[in-house]
Image (cartoon, rainbow, N blue to C red):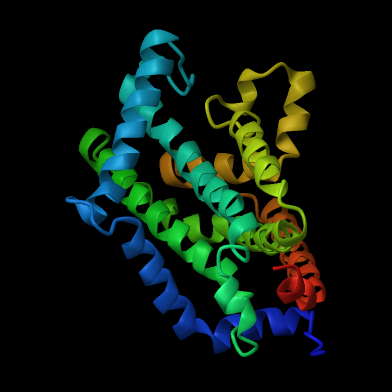
Amino acid sequence: MKNYSASPLEMINSFWCNKRLIMQLSKREVLGRYRGSTLGLSWSFFNPILMLVIYTFVFSVVFKARWGVSADESKTDFAIILFVGLLIHGLFAECINKAPGLITSNVSYVKKVVFPVEVLSWVAFMSALFHAAISLVVLLLAQLVFKHSIPWTAILLPFVLLPLFLSIMGLSWLFASLGVYLRDITQITVMFTTVMLFMSAVFFPITALPEKYQVWIRINPLAYIIEQSRNVLIFGQVPDLLTWSIMLVIGGVVAWCGFAWFQKTRKGFADVL
């Protein structure tokens, strides 16, 4: 039976050697989601707008929530700040929730010895990243229309998100493998991402919590990424390099551990399926 390398170098090499295949499958994944619909890809633009309007109405009109960034904070300010959190969490949740079914829903690929099944996690990530990019465009357009400016620090967003990207890939490989052997993992990931929605400062600033609880939210990596994304996209603040470096190392470790687990367990996929 073939042994699969679990080294960090193999993780990078797998992506680089199969980048064309990943792009082709990602394109098919994105287009396949809207195949047969009248508006097609336009739904990827309208969906984030609709959810933004609903969440903004519920929290700023019904519950009269405010972010507290200024005395004259408007509903538009609240909507834009909220949207950043929804965007980041949406990217995270889509990848994690889809991960357990990546292998079980592509049995034909598993049966093909030459097919690199580890790229299925990259395909799911690229598809989710495409929709996140559309939401980001909506956000930037809203800032231009209502605030008439975008801070220069917005160009730092890819660097802020890099630790999250690595963590997502690691967890995706982990859950994709576990989904083959433990079918209940799908229910667990849905619960996990729902909890993260409310425990990652998506709907509130961390400073709004009592001080004794703030430390628990701050050690949540997703909450850190969301907070720093708001800083660079909205408030024009540069992220702390030391903290970002620590998060990057953590993300790299998560990615490698997830990949290593996937490589060690993939030999049994065909037998189980």
Q: Is residue 205 above or below residue 263?
A: above
Give the quarter of the image for residue 176.
bottom right
206 or 106: nearer the viewer? 106
Q: Residue at x 48, y 55 (%)?
A: 157
Give the quarter of the image for residue 6.
bottom right
| Residue 121 screen position, x and y as percent | 59, 67
Q: Look at the image and tell me in which quarter the C terminus lies.
A: bottom right
Give the quarter of the image for residue 161.
bottom right
Q: Is residue 237 above or below residue 265?
A: above
Q: Is residue 39 visible?
A: yes
194 or 221: nearer the viewer? 194
Is 154 placed left or right of 239 in the picture?
A: left
Is 139 placed left or right of 69 in the picture?
A: left
Outermost residue, left side: 38
Q: Residue at x 46, y 57 (%)?
A: 128
Is 24 placed left or right of 182 in the picture?
A: left
Q: Look at the image and tell me in which quarter the N terminus lies.
A: bottom right
Q: Is residue 229 visible?
A: no
| Residue 88 screen position, x and y as percent | 51, 45
| Residue 133 screen position, x and y as percent | 38, 56
Q: How many numbered circles does the render carry?
A: 0
| Residue 197 screen position, x and y as percent | 59, 33
54 or 66: nearer the viewer? 54
Q: Residue at x 37, y 28 (%)?
A: 79
91 or 36: nearer the viewer? 36
Q: Is residue 218 above or below residue 164?
A: above
Is 230 placed left or right of 119 in the picture?
A: left
Q: Residue at x 79, y 74 (%)?
A: 268
